[in-house]
Amino acid sequence: MLTKIREKAQGAFAWGILILICVPFALWGINNYLDTGKEAPVASVGDKDFYQRDVNKAYEQYSQNLQGMGIDEQILKAQALQKLIKDEVLLQYVHAEGLVATDNEAREFIKSLPYFQVDGKFSDKQYKTLLSSQRISSGEFVNRIKNALIMEQFQHSIVDSSFATQYDVEGFFKIQNQQRDVDYVTVRLQPLTEQPTTEEISTYYQQHQDLYQTPEQVSVEYIELSLEDIAKKVIVTDDKLKAFYEEQKDQYTTPERRKISHILFAINDKTDAKTALAKAEKAKQDLASKDFAVLATEISDDKLTAKNGGDLGLFNVGVMEKAFEDAASALKLGEVSNPVKSAFGFHLIKVTELVPGNTKPFDSVKNEVTKAYQKAQAENAFYEAGEKLTEMSYENPDNLKTVADALGLSVQKSAPFTKVRGEGIAAEEKIRNAAFSEEVLQGNNSAPVELSSEHLVVVRLLEHKMAAKRDLAEVKQEVAAVLSKEKANRLAAEKAKQIKARLQAGESIQAVAAENKLEIKTEKGLTRGKNKLPEQLNDAIFKAAKPVGGKPSVFVAILPSGEQVIVSLSKVTAGIMSDDDKKQLELAKKSIANAFGQTEFNEVLNSLQADADVEVNKKAQAQ
């Protein structure tokens, strides 16, 4: 819980920055270089105007990050617009305050981003390719990074100055570890024998026609560029493969596995080198009649490993001193060394496990070597083709054939698909998002969609079918089922309301449950988040008011199934810090302080927005 608080406190702005700067570069206002004509801005912050395409771009990023959460599209678009406004308010403020980030800081940050790395290292080619695919110059991108960094700098100046007292921490654990005693009964939905009338079905259909539509669909044509396909065309010979195999031999080699144990005779203030050596020599003699592990347990000065018979685990070169490593490397399985001196003293070393290293012969891994060789040879061609794909699909936005012919690719076609489901290439969420983007729906090629670092796709609209109303006859059974479910929900809610009223009037839950033939369930010492109750029920229990004057607190929780749970909360016990909590006391203080700091930062941001020259054009927003 503490870690989550800390992540939420510090992660929100960092997440925003990554949205701002990372591939696919959902940069607010990235299209503002286009001719705006007479288009009215959706919102303005000072001299900065935002247009509907900026909101759409922000919405696309929001919808990708919140996919599957069931948040309404209009709510997301409203949040995206607010994000645009708040970011611009903050950016203008930090510039006015004179906060700066250097070019060097921006470049170091860029180099750390995984999007621009190949094999763990910054790739200038990857950097230029990805910037080119988003039609943004390096200078402009660096400037956006600097803006993001100074915004983060301002946030941290507030968040990092916040603090939490011991009282705050104790208060947190009183709530977090709180225990509650409850009794509850569940009113389940009862099957209905009476079906909705034709008139009821027709009325509901007319009032909810938006629920009964075939979803919006598109089909696309597309071209794919993949490293795997290019690699298959690389011509190989045995000579080239054998040379590559020799260069990459480590990839086909299993290193030797060697486990060792030791007995240490330490050199210290009480024992000089001569004495320690004498002890080691005597111990070597004693091993003629005594087990190494037993002797290590009895006499080794390395008390940590002595408990395990002197076991040091797997032997790794470069960890110990050279003399120790040389001796350990030369021993055979089960052999014990003569005394070996190190900075710690004298050691007796024994090899307890030895599995020789092994290199797979060329013939046994030829197929694997062939694929690796082809891939290595194809990488430059793939990146060059990626740059050409980006440039030509942008320069020829009204067709895919030009770029397909230039790269020797075929134009393929998809079956129709919706925003949330598709088959084949449309099974990829990124493809569906690109296909339904404003750019593609207006008849242009998409920017290259990066399905992976080795797979790029450009899509173009083939056919677009708007959502269409389904006939009543087609959906009659669906409507009837909804009406029956709603009626069952109402009946359950009415019964739950009656039971709640009786319990609040002082009747016992046992008597009411018996009369209604309901099963009573009891939970004693229920703790927050550490139980198997449904989430909605758990939340309701811990949000409920405490019992007052010896009377239980009675409330109703509604489950997703429509079932109504009537709860009688009889006791609340304040939580205390456990031993594990006490061990995390410093983390708790930092986490709670960060949460306080983030709240303060949000309040400052809201205050800045209230004082800023912000205008929102509701009419333009609705278009």
Image: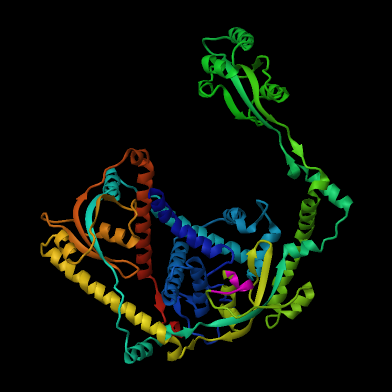
Q: Is residue 515 left or right of residue 244?
A: left
Percent coordinates x, y for residue 360 in the rendering:
78, 42
Magenta stretch holds residue 33: no
Residue 443 appears in the figure: no
Q: Is residue 55 above or below residue 606?
A: below
Q: Please state the extent of the stretch shown in magenta in the rendering.
A: 421-428
Percent coordinates x, y for residue 38 in the rendering:
52, 87
Closer to the camera in the image, 322 or 535 = 535
Q: Is residue 87 above or below residue 489?
A: above
Quadrant of the rendered image containing residue 370: bottom right
Q: Is residue 410 above or below residue 371?
A: below
Residue at image coords 38%, 88%: 205
Across the whole image, how many numbered discs are drawn on residues?
0
Quadrant of the rendered image containing residue 439: bottom right
Quadrant of the rendered image containing residue 559: bottom left
Closer to the camera in the image, 566 or 312 = 566
Residue 338 appears in the figure: yes
Residue at image coords 25%, 76%: 491
Percent coordinates x, y for residue 571 in the rendering:
19, 52
Q: Is residue 172 left or right of residue 299?
A: left
Magenta stretch holds residue 427: yes
Percent coordinates x, y for residue 52 in the rendering:
50, 80
Q: Is residue 221 above or below residue 529?
A: below
Residue at image coords 67%, 68%: 456
Closer to the camera in the image, 291 or 174 = 291
